[in-house]
Amino acid sequence: MTKLMEWLGALIGFLAVYLYLLTGEPKVSEEMMLHIKFLPIYLIGMFGGYSVYTVLYRVFTFNDCPEAAEEIQKQIEEAKVDLSAKGMHF
């Protein structure tokens, strides 16, 4: 099963339960009905918070790679020497 199918299944499940609750079939208080009506907005807010957390966590735990930095600096110097030999000046 692909991720798309998983997300669509979850979305259809959520919409089925949400529409069932919106129709007023189960008797709930007015306060609870207000929260049911705003449930999609709550979920979008929670998804946004999770997204911000995930991006910040990945940025703060990003690993430095000094060996790769040294290697690319050497390659840049080799390229400059090679291009200088071919007539390009920096």
Image (cartoon, helix red, strand yellow):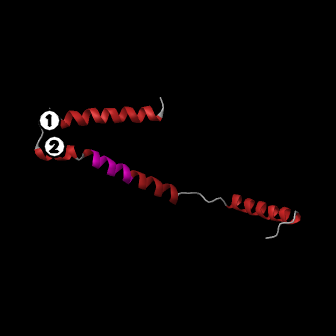
Identify the residue at image location x=16%, y=43%.
33
Q: Determine the secondary structure under disc 1.
A: loop
Q: Tag on residue 33?
A: 2
Identify which amino acid the numbered label 2 is placed on.
Met
Q: Is residue 62 magenta?
A: no
Position of 52 relative to 15 (above/below): below
Q: Tag on residue 24?
A: 1
The local crowd at label 2, few if under 14, some if 14 to 19, many if 20 or more residues have their Cα within 10 Å, is some
Residue span colored magenta: 40-49
The number of discs equals: 2
Position of 43 relative to 8 (above/below): below
| Label 1–label 2 contact, CB within 8 A | yes
Q: Is residue 41 magenta?
A: yes
Q: Determine the secondary structure under disc 2.
A: helix
> Taken as a whole, is the magenta stretch helix, strand or loop?
helix
Which comes before the other along the chain, label 1 or label 2? 1
